[in-house]
Amino acid sequence: MNEVKEKPGAAEVDAYSEGARNILQAAEQLFAGQGFDAVSIQAVAQNAGVSKANVFHHFGSKEGLYLAVLRSVCQRAAPLLQTLVKEGEDFPARLDHFAKAHVAYLLAHPGTMRLLLRELLESDARRGQELAEQAVGENFTRLIGILREGQRRGELRAVVDPAIAAALLVGADMFLFQARPVLRHLKGVGFADAPERYSEGLVDILLHGLLAQG
Amino acid sequence: MNEVKEKPGAAEVDAYSEGARNILQAAEQLFAGQGFDAVSIQAVAQNAGVSKANVFHHFGSKEGLYLAVLRSVCQRAAPLLQTLVKEGEDFPARLDHFAKAHVAYLLAHPGTMRLLLRELLESDARRGQELAEQAVGENFTRLIGILREGQRRGELRAVVDPAIAAALLVGADMFLFQARPVLRHLKGVGFADAPERYSEGLVDILLHGLLAQG
DNA sequence: GTCTATACAGGGATAGAC
DNA sequence: GTCTATCCCTGTATAGAC
């Protein structure tokens, strides 16, 4: 209550006290690593250097804490997503840029991804599913935008469904992220730890197709 | 102990008593729907129509039960995966068949998929991760086989990495599965509930590419 | 805002009778 | 193989002092 708050309703980004921020940070790490049920308030409190009761003081309940973590994560992710789109280039260049940036983003934020993917997996329509949906939906829509634009300019075949093409690229990236441990010890797979090579290969196939005749 | 057992070591498929099978079945449903931690032995016992103690009698511990479920699931999945490959056709036909069968398989077994995907998400190298890895790895390898064969016959461009092409298709299918709730209320996406249309679109892009010139 | 202490429920697991 | 009863621990959450 000591510091000046601009608008306590809208963008409550860092509107947390120091203690609360510590809790949020510890909780994010633990939730990302082990999931909701496997993490105890005790563990969060310990990692944050505060008491159990303090956690409840700030976030009301475990659910409340979890939602706060999810909100915080999505909030931080939003601005970064905008860097995925590069304006003023031709279609192949834009696709290439998106592919590289997207896969790099996923691999650089494993905690965030795990958090969101877990939510997607709960079809029980529980907790902050809307948040996860919003996050995934947003860069998906972004990629569709690039594709549509390419189609409008005639650089891209008119008959292809931009949404399906987008699913191919985004899906392949999420697949790399999720299946990495599997891919690592699978013979004939050389890209498990070479994301640039991976996205280059993806873009090449997407642009030119698999068939030999052309 | 009443019935004759052929070989109690190898293929212990239905080597369970009736009670044990009921437990296994109830557990599979619950684990698939809510994940390991969220399911109590109490709930499993109730759904199976037995007592808590009985669950421990048959499976030793909660972990043991979970592993038994995972094993059972993978065991049932294995033979079905073989139908994904169709012999004696040209490359486009085989790819088309795989794509359709694969996406249909995923959507027809949501419980199994959720179970396996959850395991993949736990990088803590815990529980039956090897099982999940084996399952995903297997049909991935299967698809690579199709692609390599096409390459050998010269139907497929020699420079493309078959593993990357496989990741595109498998990833896109897994993406449809996971992101379905999101995709449903996303404007511009018409395939969320039209898997055939989806896989046709995928195959078309994979074969011919996105570019207009050709 | 932060703590200590405590209430209370539910979880996994075991003992021992049938 | 199946049950009832029980143990013990841990988890969430609250009360109330500082």
Image (cartoon, coloured by chain):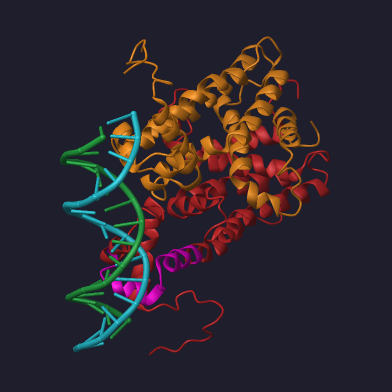
Chain colours: A orange, B red, C cyan, D green
**Horizontal placement of B41 versus B35: left or right?**
left
> B39 or B25, which is in the foreground?
B39
* Figure check: B111 above or below B26: above
Across and down, in percent, residue B74 comes to 52, 62
Q: Is residue A88 left or right of residue B31?
A: right
Q: Position of residue B92 (x, y in %)?
A: 69, 43
Q: In the shown orientation, is residue A181 left or right of residue A52?
A: right
Q: Residue at x 37, y 62 (%)?
A: B27
Magenta stretch: residue B51 in it?
A: yes
In which quadrant is the N terminus of chain B drawn?
A: bottom left
Q: Is residue B70 magenta?
A: yes
At horizontal 34% and vertical 70% (from top left) the residue drawn is B22
Residue at image point 40% right, 16% down: A11
Part of the protein shown in magenta: B47-71
Place of residue B175 in the rendered image (x, y in percent of width and height, measured from the top left): 53, 39
Image quadrant assignment for residue B180: top left
